[in-house]
Image (cartoon, rainbow, N blue to C red):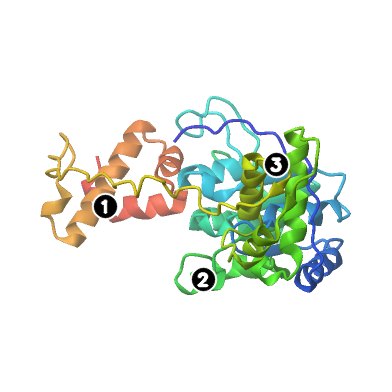
Amino acid sequence: MTAAQDFIPSKPITQEALGQSEAFLDFQERLSRVAPIDRPVLLLGERGTGKELAATRLHFLSRRWQGPFVTLNCSSLAPSLVEAELFGHEKGAFTGADKRRTGRFEAAHNGTLFLDEIGSIPMEAQEKILRVVEYGSFERVGSSVPIEVDVRIISATNANLSRRCETGRFKPDLLDRLSFEVLFLPPLRRRSGDILLLANHFAQRMAHELELEALPLFSAEASRALENHPWNGNVRELKNVVERAVYRAHDRTIKEIVFNPFVSPYGELPDPVEPTREPPEPAEGVPDFTAMPLKSAVATLEIHLVNRALSISRHNQRRAADILGLSYDQLRGIIRKHREKLQ
């Protein structure tokens, strides 16, 4: 486990929400109503629907607008780094932690913390987030000193969290705490009338960036193509398609729309076949789990990894737990189970 780099709280997003469809206006009205209420909000929507933009608007329409707006994309971190990123760590808490580091919760004090892709957070970190929501305090990794914070949590995901609760991948108690209000972002295909409005907006911005003298126009055929496309990538996909069309256009009128830039004019590229390889021999000192019954392999793997973590941490059990991505109590349980076989 290595220490994450220091971060800078997010700057305000200058992009304005744009739309005139009933679905879009209804969403904006619901967002504006809940923004001043100092409670957690859960944003649910497909990829590319603008969840971070919605979270930013919630913050700047709230009473916390002068406080920090801190973001974390939970899917961008290895599971072993999530706790340190959220709650910070003390110097020496784990390998590579050469100085104390402030976490996102502490940085968001008196402001808003936006947790994007929250469905990917490991269960151990979910437990600590639940304690922060309930009691307003937490401990840095490697410390037992409580830190009190006042943070509003806005979370977002495109996953079905209710189903993840049923399958044991998300804590039902945490979902209850994070969903004072649940806002569903409408997909672009359900925003009747907004596609051409957004397309012209993105086209004008791209023309300005390219320093074109005349504003681009879409031909009737190009407009129909835009309106009939399913837009599985939503607004993000529309923006990419329009900007590419403006850049490629030979005159002011855009006649050609390329939805899939990966179609080769020379035929489909072959997918290289990976050569088959014999399974590698187990490294020296590492048991060959493939030759064991399942229960024996699991027990042997636990013993091997715990021994290794204890050796790296010089038998500091809290540091060993961090290396393994476990809570201290979970590690203690494994040690008790295999006490006679651990070194």
Q: Residue at x 74, y 56 (%)?
A: 198
Numbered circle sitting on residue 140: none
User: Disc 2 marks which amino acid?
Assistant: Cys
Q: CA distance from mark 3 to mark 2?
A: 53 Å
Q: Can you say which quadrant of the picture contains the C terminus?
A: top left
Q: CA distance from mark 1 to mark 2?
A: 31 Å
Question: Looking at the picture, how far across and down is residue 169, in whole percent?
Answer: 47, 65
Q: Residue at x 65, y 58 (%)?
A: 222
Q: CA distance from mark 1 to mark 3?
A: 73 Å
Numbered circle sitting on residue 165: 2
Position above or below: 302 against 47: above
User: Disc 3 marks which amino acid?
Assistant: Asp
Q: Earlier in the sequence, mark 1 or mark 2?
A: 2
Front residue of this view, candidates 132 and 108: 108
**Which one is closest to the eye, mark 1 or mark 3?**
3
Question: Looking at the picture, how far across and down is residue 175, in whole percent?
Answer: 61, 67
Residue 15 lies left or right of residue 300; in this view the side is right
Front residue of this view, candidates 203 and 46: 203
Residue 138 lies left or right of residue 296; in this view the side is right
Marks 1,2: beta carbons within 8 A:
no
Marks 1,3: beta carbons within 8 A:
no
Residue for badge 1: 338
User: Disc 1 marks which amino acid?
Assistant: His
Question: Looking at the picture, how far across and down is residue 197, in whole percent?
Answer: 77, 59
Quadrant in the rendering for residue 287: top left
Residue 275 shows up from this direction: yes
Secondary structure under tag 2 reads: helix
Numbered circle sitting on residue 251: 3
**Which one is closest to the eye, mark 3 or mark 2?**
3
